[in-house]
Amino acid sequence: MLRLVLLTSLAALVLGTDKFSRDDFPPDFVFGAAASAYQVEGAANLDGRTPSIWDTFAHAGIRNDTSIFEYPIAPWGLQGILEYIKQFYGNPPVYIHENGQRTRRNSTLEDWPRVKYLHGYIGSLLDALRNGSNTRGYFTWSFLDLFEMLDGYESSYGLYFVDLDDPDLKRQPKLSAHWYSNFLKGKNISSDGYIELQKNISAVSPYFLE
């Protein structure tokens, strides 16, 4: 019976939001990009902190040999979970943390899989809000490339690339950083805008990683 009720309610959801902007969300809705100082290379030398077991673990050479690297993009799953929480847990306040797409490190700054992921999941979040979800915040993972628990430095989740071979740990914005910035500034975002975004970014940030 529980499953039947949930499936019936999901069938009535508002679906398919493609074009949207920050202004479509409540004014007090919180957006951000999550990160952890202990997962950032070089953090052991900041603010007087000394190396910890985390820093030792970070250089242990963990590797990931999986052939399927990127996560499948299924925004309806997020919307379904939020609908479930609304119906069966009294619609409590919800803050979404660490929602992001994994790509291989040092591939390219034009991270289209992450752009498509963000577009899909934030659009789905807006659909959930329009259907009555009490979600209050969304934080993408992650602000910049970090040491990941499961595969070390083999994968990348960041909106910003960190050059670990540079003593100054130079950072460069990826295409997803520009997309997220445009969204937060209130610009309309749609799947049709991918090509236009690429043209604009390529004109000012023609970065490719070897």
Image (cartoon, rainbow, N blue to C red):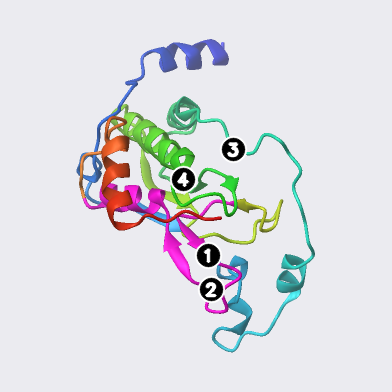
Q: Secondary structure at mark 1?
A: strand
Q: Residue 173, located in which quarter of the rendered image?
A: bottom left
Q: Secondary structure at mark 3?
A: loop
Q: Is mark 2 in CB contact (under 8 Å) with mark 1?
A: yes
Q: Which residues are magenta?
A: 156-185
Q: Which numbered disc, 2 or 3, marks the residue that appears first in the sequence?
A: 3
The CA span between labels 2 and 1 is 6 Å
Percent across and percent down for residue 31 are: 35, 52
Identity of the amino acid at label 1? Val
Numbered disc in front, either 3 or 4 = 4
**Residue beneath label 2, please?**
169
- Which residue position is annotated with label 3? 70
Q: Which mark is residue 22?
A: none
Q: Where is residue 196 shown, x and y percent of the image?
A: 26, 39
Amino acid type for the residue under numbered disc 3? Glu
Of labels 2 and 1, earlier in sequence is 1
Q: Nearer the viewer, residue 111 or 137?
A: 111
Q: Measure how far apart labels 1 and 3 are at the Cα level.
A: 19 Å
